[in-house]
């Protein structure tokens, strides 16, 4: 997401992040997971709160994060990727980490879209693929993924999803190609419950239900 080069005030950036988060959720590009951010200046940016983007409200406060340094309380571990991209790319004014259903399927074939139509032309010749299946929650992985992005407008992170697993399988089978399958060690490393994985999905699935607990509580069987 390349915003205008005009510097945003903290309030403008917070409003933009909240608005973008809800828009991404409404468009079906994010369910329980994902985050977006906007640069404030060379040293700081604001990122959406640790909750499903489609459920972000005007009362939710985005988190201010340093481009260099430890993540503050309230920032998800994956926000390290935002830090690493902002460090490398002075031209980048905003970042969205979302889960496009068809991109997830295509990445399971080890592929990213070629420039075959108007929207694809923005990413020509094609977005690079980050093939490591681990969640990007440490500085080393974040730096490597940012290096994979290079000067491109987007990088595809291979194989995210949940119920999406069945849809991805069907999409891959329909191509007649073998596709890529997680190795046992990849699956074990990826199947984590850390970083509010269960709690955020629970909040997404139970949004609007008067019997549901408050944000971030998680289902009753999940320990704190």
Image (cartoon, grey):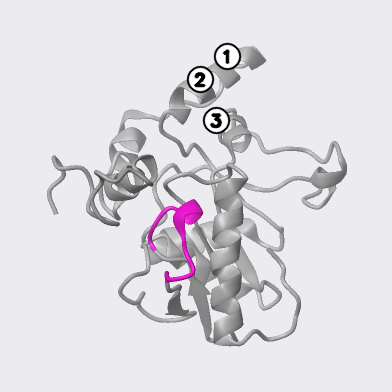
Q: Visible in this render: residue 80? A: yes
The stretch of residues the image draws in magenta is 50-60
Q: Residues within 10 Å of mark 3 (few under 14, many from 20)?
A: many
Q: Residues within 10 Å of mark 2 (few under 14, many from 20)?
A: some
Q: Name the residue under label 3.
A: 108
Label annotation for residue 2: none
x, y (%) of residue 74? 33, 70
Q: Distance between the residues labelled 3 and 2?
A: 9 Å
- Dominant SS of magenta comes to loop
Q: Are marks 2 and 1 in contact (CB under 8 Å)?
A: yes
Q: Mark 1 points at which residue?
A: 173
Residue at 61%, 55% (x, y): give it. 23
User: Residue 9 sits in which quadrant?
Assistant: bottom right
Quadrant where the N terminus sits is bottom right
- Which is nearer the N-term, disc 3 or disc 2? 3
Q: Please say whether residue 200 is one of the residues in the magenta stretch.
A: no
Residue at 81%, 52% (x, y): give it. 122
Residue at 58%, 35% (x, y): give it. 101
Query: Circle 3 sits in a helix, a strand or a loop, which is it?
Result: loop
Q: How far apart are marks 1 and 3 (CA)?
A: 11 Å
Which residue occupies the foreground of this view, 202 or 100? 202
Which residue occupies the foreground of this view, 154 or 97? 97
x, y (%) of residue 81? 49, 63
Q: Name the residue under label 2.
A: 169
Query: Circle 1 sits in a helix, a strand or a loop, which is it?
Result: helix
């Amino acid at each position: 997401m390349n915003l205008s080069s005009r510097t945003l005030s903290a309030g403008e950036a917070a409003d933009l992040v909240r608005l973008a988060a809800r828009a991404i959720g409404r468009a079906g590009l994010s369910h329980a997971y994902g985050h977006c951010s906007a640069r404030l200046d060379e040293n700081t940016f604001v990122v959406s709160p640790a909750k499903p983007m489609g459920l972000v409200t005007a009362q939710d406060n985005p988190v201010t994060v340093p481009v260099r340094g430890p993540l503050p309380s309230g920032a998800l571990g994956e926000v390290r990727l935002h830090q690493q991209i902002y460090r490398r790319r002075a031209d980048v004014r905003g970042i969205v980490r979302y889960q496009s259903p068809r991109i997830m399927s295509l990445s399971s074939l080890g592929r990213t879209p070629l420039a075959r139509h108007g929207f694809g032309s923005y990413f020509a010749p094609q977005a690079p693929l980050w093939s490591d299946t681990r969640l990007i929650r440490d500085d080393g992985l974040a730096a490597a993924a940012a290096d994979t992005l290079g000067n491109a407008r987007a990088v595809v992170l291979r194989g995210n999803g949940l119920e999406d697993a069945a849809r991805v399988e069907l999409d891959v089978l329909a191509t007649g190609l073998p596709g890529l399958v997680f190795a046992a060690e990849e699956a074990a490393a990826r199947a984590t419950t850390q970083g509010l994985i269960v709690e955020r999905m629970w909040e997404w699935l139970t949004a609007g239900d008067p019997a549901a607990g408050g944000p971030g509580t998680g289902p009753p069987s999940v320990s704190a």
